[in-house]
Amino acid sequence: MIVTTTNTIEGNPIQQYLGVISSETIIGANIFKDIFAGLRDIVGGRSGTYERVIQEAKQTALNELQQKAAAIGANAIVGVDLDFETVGGKGSMLMVVATGTAVKV
C-alpha cells in the first residue's frame, strides 16, 4: 500500500476517493523509562528510550491506518498527517493520531 503525506501520487492518478480515515495510539511510559530518561536529561544527550517509544507509537498508528484503508478497499493513503500529544497525569502517556484519505489509484 502506498502511504504518502502528499495529496497526489506521481504517476498514479487517483481513481476514487474512499474517505478520511484515522487511527489513534496511546502508549504509556513506565517508571523505569522515566528514571533512565531523567538521568539522560542530567548528563545530556538524546533519550533513546523515549525515541523508541515514539517510533513504536508512530508505526502502530500507521499500521492501523493501513488496515483501515485496506478494509474499505483502498490501495493507497494520501495526505497523511501525524499528530503527537502527551496525555494523562503529568503527561505520562503519548498519543499519536494518524489521519489521511483512503483512495484507489
Image (cartoon, helix red, strand yellow):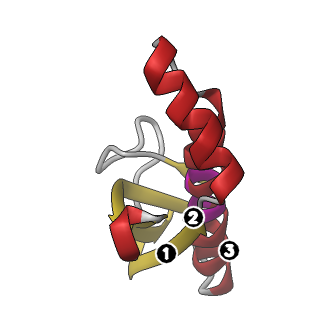
Task: Name which residue lies at 51% across and 19% down.
Answer: 46
Q: Taking 4 as reference, is 63 above or below it? A: below
Marks 1 and 2, how far apart in space?
A: 6 Å
Q: Left or right: where does residue 99 sit relative to residue 60? A: left
Which residue in the structure is indicated by mark 3?
A: 67
**Residue 96: x, y in percent?**
45, 63
Q: Which residue in the rendered view is the most extreme toward the bottom?
A: 72
- Sequence-first disc among 2 and 3: 2
Residue at the location (64% across, 35% down)? 36
Q: Are marks 1 and 2 in contact (CB under 8 Å)?
A: yes
Stretch of the chain drawn in magenta: 58-62
Asked if residue 51 lies in the magenta stretch, the reply is no
Q: Amino acid at mark 3?
A: Gln
Q: Is residue 24 visible?
A: yes
Q: Secondary structure at mark 3?
A: helix
Say which residue appears at 35% left-offset and 66% top-offset: 90
User: Can I make out residue 105 in this image?
Assistant: no
Q: Which mark is residue 24?
A: 1
User: Marks 1 and 3: which is nearer the front?
Assistant: 1
Instruction: Name the residue: 53% across, 50% down.
Output: 3
Q: Residues within 10 Å of mark 2 (few under 14, many from 20)?
A: many
The 10 Å Cα crowd at callout 1, few under 14, some 14 to 19, many 20 or more, is some
- Residue 27: % across, % down: 59, 66
Considering depth in this image, is 45 or 63 the residue closer to the camera?
A: 45
